[in-house]
Image (cartoon, helix red, strand yellow):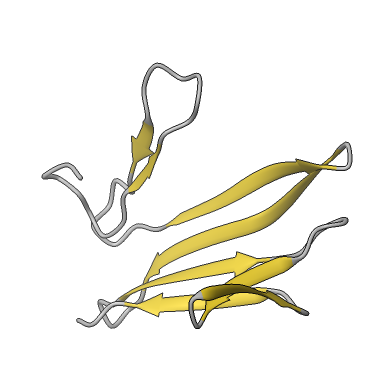
Amino acid sequence: MPANTRNFWLHADVDGRGSSLSGGPVARDGGFDQSIAQRADGCVTYPVSITGRNLSTGQNIMEIDVRSTGGSHVEVYRGGKWVKVRSNVSVRIVSER
C-alpha cells in the first residue's frame, strides 16, 4: 500500500496484465463503488459489489454484497469448511474512529 493512501485503496492483480490495477479516492473523505463481473452459462453477471464510504462521524464503512446469479450459489466459510447458504450474503465493515 502506498504511503499516500487515503481512507480506501483498491489493488488488483489480473492474469495477463503487465501491471496491477490500483487507486483510491482523491479526497480524504472520498469513497468508491466496485462491481465484479463473471461469465456464467454464457451470460455476464455481477455477483459481487463493494462500496466504500466515509461517514459524517469520520468512520469509514465498507459494504460487500455477494449474490447468487444464474446457476450459481453462495458459500461461506464456517467452522473450518465451506457451507452452501440459501440466500445472498451482505457484510458491513465499520472502522473504529
Residue at image point 47% right, 78% down: 92
Quadrant in which the C terminus is drawn: bottom left
Of residues 84 and 35, the one nearer the viewer is 84
Q: Would you place residue 22 above or below residue 65 in this image?
A: above
Residue at image point 60% right, 50% down: 35
- From the viewer's perspective, tell me whether residue 79 is left or right of residue 53: right
Query: Where residue 32 sits: x, y (%)?
Result: 45, 54
Q: Quadrant of residue 28?
A: bottom left
Q: Would you place residue 69 above or below residue 3 in this image?
A: below
Query: Where residue 25 sits: x, y (%)?
Result: 33, 49
Residue at image point 48% right, 30% down: 14
Q: Would you place residue 9 above or below residue 67 in this image?
A: above
Residue at image point 31% right, 56% down: 8
Quadrant in which the N terminus is drawn: top left
Q: Would you place residue 75 above or below residue 33 in this image?
A: below
- From the viewer's perspective, tell me whether residue 46 is left or right of residue 49: right
